[in-house]
Each structure stands twice: as C-alpha cells, then as structure tokens.
C-alpha cells in the first residue's frame, strides 16, 4: 500500500530579528513556498523512518534525526498505540540553512501523526508535539520557526506572547540565496549568549535589533521598501558584531548590493545558511539572482506583494 500524504509544510524566512528574538525582542518571519516538505504514514511490521538521510528502523536513526525519532516514539507511547508505522518525509527544503527545515519536519510529522491516528487536535497540540523535536534539535528555540511553519502565515513574533499574524503587502521582491554551507544555529545562539552575558555592549546590540524590527514593521505597513532595505543593512551590521555572519554570507550580501539590492542580510542562525536581499522590482531581483547563481549558489525569488 502506498503511503498517504497527511501533511505538507513549507519553509520559512526570518525577515528581521533573528537572535534578538531569543531575548524577547520582536522579529518578523514569513512562510516561503518555494520549498516544501510532505509527510506520509502507512502501517508497517516495525516502526520505520524514511527520509533523505536515512531509511531504516526508527530505533536505529542517526543523531541528526533524534528530534523526529523522539517525537514519534513519545507520541505512540502517550496515546498507547500498538500499531507499527512507516513514516516517510519527502523534502526539498535545504537542511540546516536557516530555512526552517527542522520546524517543517517537526510540525509536519506531528500533524501527520494526529491525522493518521484520527486523534482530534488543534494547532496548540501540534505545536506542543513539534516542540519536543525542536528542543532536541535547537536546545531552547524562541519558537519563531515553529509558529510561522504551523500557521503558514507571516508573523510579528515576540517570545512568550500570543503570535500576531502580520500580512505583508510590499511592493518588493525578496531574493533568498543559500551559501551551501550548513548553518550552526545551536552554536551561534550559545556564542551570542556568552557575549551578551559578558558585556553590556552586546546586550545593547540585541536591543538595537529589537528597535529595527519595530521600525521594519512600520515600514512594511506603510509600503516603504527602500527604507526597509536600509533597516536590513543595519540589522546585518549588528548581526556581524554579534559574530554570527561569515565570509561567504558577506560576499553574497556585497554582490547583492552591487547589483541593485535595497538591502541585504543573513537570515536565520547565520554562520553559513542563507542570506536575503530586497529588490524594488523583478528585473533587479533577477539581476541579483543571476549574479549569485554565477558564483554557484541556489537562489529563489519571492514576491512580497500579498505574500505570494
Ligand atoms: O537557523 P534557524 O532557521 O533555525 O533560525 C534560528 C533563529 C534564531 O533566532 C537564531 C534562534 C531562535 O531560536 O529563534
């Protein structure tokens, strides 16, 4: 019997506020529909997991898949389920690149389990189960990734507060480009914490990032992409001071600016992963895309008009 697709989730992009969001500052994140992840489940003799990196018994999964493995095991145990299942994850979201692949798999698997076993649930239940996996992968995540993936809507997010849906309708295009280097979110978050605890100057950078997110919100509401671009540049400078950028990201940001971007910055945890650039029209967006593809990068363009 073929696996039945029970959930489809998408990637996410943090527009502004990564890292500072961990300290209670606001951040803006948007779903990105250019890449996605599907989860299907069918009955099996043994609990089994299939994905890009693994195909075998659930109990023999590698360290990388510990989050999803634990989520599935705890779910079956909690609901006293004896049936054995094969869980299949099909994804084209680049892994560990700040595009939310772990949130997409955590939310996707949690939702698929509820659907397959026909257990009534709401979005809070999915969030709770997805967080079991996320905490193993990220340590102590702010929750921004899971929230944007779960709701599949742009959000203005402050940790610990009810999420605010934040529809974006901006006359601009977002270019998303992958360095091809695995980001190191857990390590970056931990290093930023050490800096923040060591010197007030770093705490101030975090606060400044929070102010930039607030300003970005107003600029988006007033459809002012050029000023938003400037804010993105300032955010990147602060992330650089927090030591979470790297050479490759900076080169790609530089290329984007030289090809007409209104602004550019890293997105997500940094130290590898992805960067984003803002362009005022599709011609400039394509020019930036071409210039980044010339140096061998994977690049996507997303319209910010009505959150296409
Ligand atoms: O690297 P990603 O996509 O998982 O983004 C992490 C965002 C951080 O703000 C750095 C961490 C967090 O938990 O919010």
Image: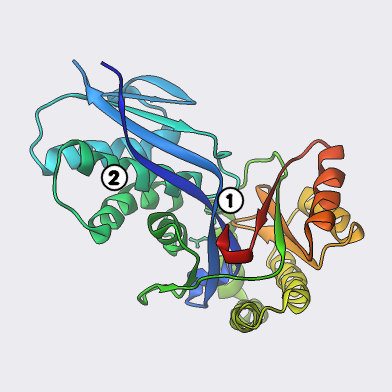
Task: Identify the disc placed on residue 165.
Answer: none
Task: Identify the disc placed on residue 110.
Answer: 2
Could you say which quadrant of the image residue 37 lies in?
Answer: top left
Q: Position of residue 259 (x, y in %)?
A: 90, 57
Quick check: 167 left or right of 199? left
Residue depicted at x 9% and y 28%: 82
Q: Is residue 202 above or below residue 7?
A: below
Say which residue label 1 marks: 98
Residue depicted at x 73% and y 69%: 241
Quick check: 48 left or right of 274? left
Is residue 271 visible to us here? no
Q: Is mark 1 within 8 Å of ligand 1?
A: yes
Is residue 17 visible to us here? yes
Q: Is residue 71 above or below residue 271?
A: above
**Local secondary structure at mark 2:** helix
Q: State the separation of the CA atoms marked 2 and 1.
A: 21 Å
Q: Is residue 176 above or below residue 165?
A: above
Q: Is mark 2 within 8 Å of ligand 1?
A: no
Q: Position of residue 134 (x, y in %)?
A: 39, 50
Disc 2 crowd, CA 10 A, few/some/many (<14, 14-19, 20+): many
Q: Is residue 234 above or below residue 303?
A: below
The foreground one among 291 and 168 is 168
């Amino acid at each position: 019997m073929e696996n039945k697709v029970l959930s489809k989730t998408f990637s996410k992009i943090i527009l502004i506020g990564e890292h500072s969001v961990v300290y209670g500052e606001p951040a803006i994140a948007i779903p990105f529909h250019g890449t996605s992840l599907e989860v299907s489940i069918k009955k099996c003799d043994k609990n089994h997991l299939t994905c890009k990196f693994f195909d075998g018994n659930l109990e023999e999964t590698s360290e990388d898949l510990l989050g999803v493995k634990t989520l599935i095991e705890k779910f079956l145990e909690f609901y006293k389920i004896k049936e054995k299942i094969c869980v299949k994850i099909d994804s084209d979201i680049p892994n560990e690149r700040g595009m939310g692949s772990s949130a997409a798999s955590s939310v996707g698997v949690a939702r698929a389990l509820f659907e397959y076993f026909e257990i009534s649930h709401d979005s809070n239940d999915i969030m709770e189960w997805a967080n079991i996996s996320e905490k193993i992968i990220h340590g102590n995540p702010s929750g921004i990734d899971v929230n944007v993936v779960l709701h599949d809507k742009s959000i203005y997010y402050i940790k610990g507060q009810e999420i605010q849906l934040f529809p974006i309708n901006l006359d601009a295009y977002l270019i998303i480009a992958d360095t091809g280097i695995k980001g190191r979110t857990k390590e970056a978050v931990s290093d930023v914490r050490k800096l923040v605890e060591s010197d007030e100057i770093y705490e101030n950078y975090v606060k400044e990032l929070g102010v930039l997110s607030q300003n970005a919100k107003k600029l988006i509401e007033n459809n002012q992409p050029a000023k938003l671009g400037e804010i993105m540049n300032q955010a990147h400078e602060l992330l650089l001071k927090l030591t979470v950028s790297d050479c490759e990201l900076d080169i790609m940001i530089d290329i984007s600016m030289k090809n007409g971007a209104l602004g550019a910055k890293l997105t997500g945890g940094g130290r590898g992963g992805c960067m984003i650039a803002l362009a005022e029209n599709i011609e400039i967006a394509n020019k930036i895309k071409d210039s980044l593809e010339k140096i061998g990068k994977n690049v996507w363009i997303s319209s910010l008009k009505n959150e296409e």
